[in-house]
Amino acid sequence: MIDLNADLGEGMGDDLAMLEIVTSASIACGGHAGDAHSMRRAVRGALHNGVRIGAHPGFVDPHHFGRRRLDIPADRLSAQIVAQVAQLHDIAQAEGAAITYLKLHGALANMAAEDRALAKTLFAAVDAAFPGLSVLALAASEQEWAARDLGLDVILEAYADRAYTADGQLVSRAHRGSVITDEQLVIDRCLRLAETGEIVAIDGTIFKSEARSICLHGDTPGALDLARAVHAALAKTGAL
């Protein structure tokens, strides 16, 4: 079965409508975006729709939406990530909900996907503060191996609307074609992953992926219509 996840609470799109479509919500918790109000609203929406809740921390850099790589000492960065998760944890707990997984955001996620030591440092810090959280990570990345090294539960992720390199990593947003907005192409990619476990890279290379969670970005143009179309297509095949 396929899990559909979306990054929410980021101040764009229609979160409440998206929560009627997805099965997992990665909620921004004050670093790249989000505040107490947006977190509480997203948590309540997730509870109402029976959607799994995850923490979505990133660099404390809202001006660049957490998409700029920063050089921050590991101990300071770990403290920032734990503090972000703590904010969402406290709000979720007050609403009678619980965080079940961690998903890093933006540039930090990309850096951790390339650097196992960085990923292990961050995951270990969060696990020490909030034991038992799963890690939602890009399949076949250093994030996956770091989480497995630490004995953490891993949920493997692929992206519906992002282009891949031949080695299974995401194409930088700085490159043309990195974000895919053609609805039929996105649907075909999701169906192919669900049915065959295959992803077609930007150069035409086909590679295997064990991902069973598909991310739908809330800031992609036409995100809500795209999410509905993907949901309908996967539901029709019985993949949801």
Image (cartoon, grey):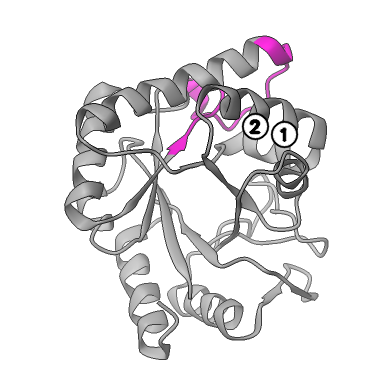
Residue 197 colored in magenta in the image: no
Element marked by disc 1: helix
Which numbered dot is residue 138? none
| Left or right side of 14 for 4 | right
Residue 126 spot, x, y in % from top left:
57, 27
Would you say residue 14 is visible in this rendering? no
Considering every residue shown, the one lying at the far bottom of the view is: 237
For mark 2, what is the residue? 123
Q: Position of residue 3 (x, y in %)?
A: 45, 65
Residue at 68 percent of width and 20 percent of height? 70
Residue drawn at (80%, 75%) of the image? 205
Structural crowding at the residue carrying mark 1, measured as other residues with C-alpha within 10 Å and reported as few (<14), some (14–19) or many (≥20): many
Task: Return the residue nearer the eye: 154 or 173.
Answer: 154
Amino acid of disc 2: Phe
Q: Which residue in the protein does label 1 denote?
A: 119
Kindly report which numbered mark, 2 or 1, lies closer to the viewer in this rendering.
Answer: 2
Q: Nearer the viewer, residue 103 or 215?
A: 103
Taking the image as shown, residue 210 lies to the left or right of residue 49, namely right
Q: Is residue 25 left or right of residue 49?
A: right
For the C terminus, give its image quadrant: bottom left
Q: Is residue 216 visible?
A: yes
Residue 57 among those drawn in magenta: yes
Point 76% across, 29% down: residue: 118
* Residue 174 place in picture, x, y as percent: 66, 44
Q: Which residues are magenta?
A: 55-75
Q: Circles 2 and 1: CB distance less than 8 Å?
A: yes
* Residue 229 occupies quadrant: bottom left
* Element class at badge 2: helix
| Neighbours of disc 2 within 10 Å: few (<14), some (14-19), many (20+) | many
Secondary structure mainly formed by the magenta segment: loop
Q: Amino acid at mark 1?
A: Ala
Note whether 120 is above or below 20 in the view shown. above
